[in-house]
Amino acid sequence: MTGGAPSKRTARGEVWRLASRYNPGVSLSVYIHFPYCLQKCPYCDFASASIQRADVPSSGYADAVLMELEERVAGFEKIPPLASVFFGGGTPSLWEPRELGRVLTGIRSAFDQPHAGAGHQQALEVTVECNPSSLDQARAAALREAGVNRLSIGVQSLNNDRLRFLGRLHDRASALRAVAEAQSEMPRVSADLMFGMPGQSAGDFVAELEQLLALEPAHLSIYALTIEPSTQFGALHRKGRLQLAPDGDFAETFMRTHEVLSTIGFEHYEVSNYARPGQASEHNLHYWRGGAYLGLGAGAVGCLHVTPPANSRKHACTREGRARRYRNTPDPATYGSAATAPEREVFEEWLGSEELTREALMLGLRTCEGVDLAETETRLGRDPLVGRATSVEQQRATGNLVTEGHRMRVPYSRWLHLDSIIASIF
Ligand code: SF4
């Protein structure tokens, strides 16, 4: 992995030319980052700037994203099929639905995907992340009209003290209202919950989960609170003024959550994600299966599969250089004033087969379906077990890895040890 060479040092135009050489059979997801929130949460290290609701530059930001879309797609040699669209952030529910819809229309046009329209089956999954403080029934309806068919709502907790601890702007009642109103307008709704807060027992978490289950959600994302060094919580943690729940509580909460949700028919399809049958997030599955994605917007990351020419210096550096990952500047003002990709991007790395194999294992083993070894070999041109056959065999012998046909996975009973199992085969 070359890692981190700023694109400004790359000959102008070269990045573009290389990044556009798609394998035409490979589908592509599009991620659009909306870099504004009403208030920065103390645990969050995502690219987001605080802004007053009235100051959100909905139209200008849509223009900037559409300009980036046009420029990036113009460089593609072939237009790949579109797998999914995801508006994340930040808080994209602050974006005026009309302007978000303008961006979505641009994406559909660029990839030749007509809007199915009301009353028709919508094949393309289009998700918008929402916060309860910027979502009501009218906004959910407007987003549906704009072509969105899935909302992911950041509930995080249904305990008011914990919501205050997390610095959230909503309370329990408004979170439940937002989920219910979203469900009344939108075909698919997901909710996020967090656990592992100080003093939060497994029983406390399950009590919150059960309040949410009363609304019969079809999809849940359940994450442990983690301390990121660059956040307010990170600073408090370094000073010894913030402790997370002990490991034992974490494990108990994880296992009880799995039991509760599995018993009522949810599939635990990824370590942090549960879905009713047929309700898994296609966008996330696309990532976890190693799919390519186009990132648009301030702070967005994209990863495009490419085939550099034989005489490329990058090609030599990265052995095969099968994908290029880039990150746009997180600063909305810089992003808005940039005219070309090299001006927008603050980071790029070229990934060869070994790097992509590691990613395929790291992401795939976090899912219940595991890694498709045959597909990975076809996609990356090398056997993913080369160089790790002994360690894989050792993990198989202990039951940490299971192979069925051409799939390799970690059984549920070992998911608490996923990180060390994955590390052992790297
Ligand atoms: S609302 Fe979400 S993206 Fe915004 S600061 Fe809070 S956690 Fe981060």
Image (tube, helix red, strand yellow):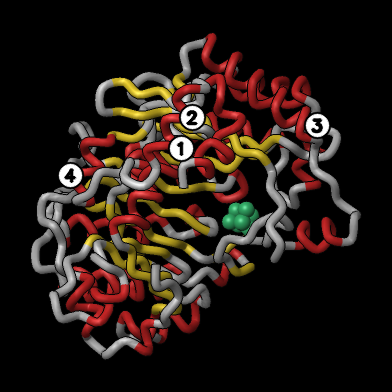
Q: Label 2 is placed on what type of residue? A: Gln
Q: Is residue 267 above or below residue 81?
A: above
**What is the tally of numbered marks visible in this picture?**
4
Q: Secondary structure at mark 4?
A: helix
Q: CA distance from mark 1 to mark 2?
A: 6 Å
Q: Which residue is mark 1?
A: 391
Query: Residue at point 22% right, 78% down?
Result: 16
Horizontally, is 245 left or right of 68 in the view? right
State which mark lies toward you, 1 or 4.
1
Q: Which residue is mark 3?
A: 200
Q: Is residue 360 above or below residue 330?
A: above
Q: Is residue 43 above or below residue 185?
A: below
Q: CA distance from mark 3 to mark 1?
A: 37 Å
| Residue 102 seen anywhere in this rendered image of the structure | no
Give yes or no for contact between labels 3 and 1 (Cβ–Cβ under 8 Å): no
Query: Residue at point 52% right, 22% down?
Result: 398
Q: Is residue 236 above or below residue 326?
A: above
Q: Secondary structure at mark 1?
A: helix
Q: Secondary structure at mark 3?
A: loop
Horizontally, is 20 left or right of 133 in the view? left
Q: Which residue is mark 2?
A: 395
First of labels 3, 4 by sequence position: 3
Q: Quadrant of the N terminus?
A: bottom left
Give yes or no for contact between labels 1 and 2 (Cβ–Cβ under 8 Å): yes
Q: Label 4 is placed on what type of residue? A: Thr
Q: Label 3 is placed on what type of residue? A: Gln
Quarter assignment of residue 67: bottom left
Q: Secondary structure at mark 2?
A: helix
Q: Which residue is mark 4?
A: 378
Q: CA distance from mark 2 to mark 3?
A: 33 Å
Image x and y of residue 172, in percent: 71, 34
